[in-house]
Image (cartoon, helix red, strand yellow):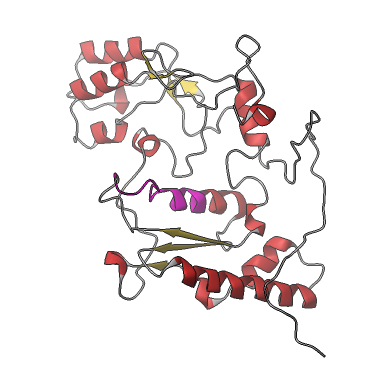
Amino acid sequence: DDLKNILGTDPKTGAALRPLDNVGVQYGLRALQSDRISPAEFVALNRGVGGVDLDGNFMTQREAMSSYEAHRIFADSLVGEYGAINQAPMIDQTIPLTDDIPTVDIHDQIRPYEIRARLNANYGDHDSQAIWSGAPLPSTAILAAEKWLTAIDKLQAHYPYRARGWLVAHARPIAAADQCRVGGAGAPAECSVLSHSGPRQMAGGPMTEDVVKCRLRPLRRSDYPSAMTSAQFRALKHIFPTGVCAYHRHSVGWVAHSHTWVSFGDQTLYRDPVVVPYPLVRSEVPAKS
């Protein structure tokens, strides 16, 4: 309900609309295709996955949002990396490197890589993002961020008319490079190799995980292994009567660029981006002349 101003409300209940949709999602599809689960397990999983109701309780039917809600999610920047995120230097510190013990850490390790995939897709690079896994400690990241922000200030003084995204990318110091350490110590390792995925990637979705409500297509027998029986394929058609996700297409509600610097302080929802001064609060005291 804290998102009422952004998502709007259900006229029947008065509650905030929910940004949840799993219609057409084939959970475990890649595991099925790689023979890690059987066709029977795949059918049972998708028959029983269901969803959650407004109070977070399990329900047998899947969750569905309207195309209006999906558009609001994109336009109002609830899907990150579609607004002005390339203008913000980011040090994404995820500890540990992998999800070996996911019950210990709530921060899914795939999320920084999803952000990187979105940056690459939307801006052609990820120059505004550094991924740090394992070590060093957050205090080190603060020092690196301080260097980065100071460098942006200095570069902007020389190039006052350059775009903010250009300044962020070209001011990035060596201290803000990727640093991924296996085991939490030692020299940084390559950050681009993933050994895990999220449920939506395992369902055939993209690394960007920006398909909040998928467009649907008919089921194709060729998508499933030959071990799947005719009865099991008919069961899938019953589970997915309207079709399955077509991940080669943009999400329902997709926009090329979200609104930026939007205020939700009153009843007016501004639809046109407004340019505002870019204030910087710095901890460094300028030297006296």
- The answer to whether any part of residue 103 appears in the image is yes
**Is residue 150 rendered to the left or right of residue 263?**
left
Residue 74 horizontal/vertical position (percent): 63, 35
The residue sitting at 59% across, 22% down in the picture is 17
Residue 252 horizontal/vertical position (percent): 58, 27
Which residue is more in the foreground, 267 or 164?
A: 267
Q: Which residues are magenta?
A: 103-117
Residue 80 horizontal/vertical position (percent): 58, 44
When asked about the image quadrant of residue 30, the answer is: top left
**Is residue 107 rendered to the left or right of residue 226?**
right
Task: Specify whether residue 112 is painted magenta.
Answer: yes
Task: Specify whether residue 136 is painted magenta.
Answer: no
> The N terminus is located in which quarter?
top right
- The answer to whether any part of residue 177 appears in the image is no
Which residue is more in the foreground, 32 or 103?
A: 103
**Is residue 199 rendered to the left or right of residue 260?**
left
Residue most extreme to the bottom: 289
- The total of numbered circles placed on residues is 0
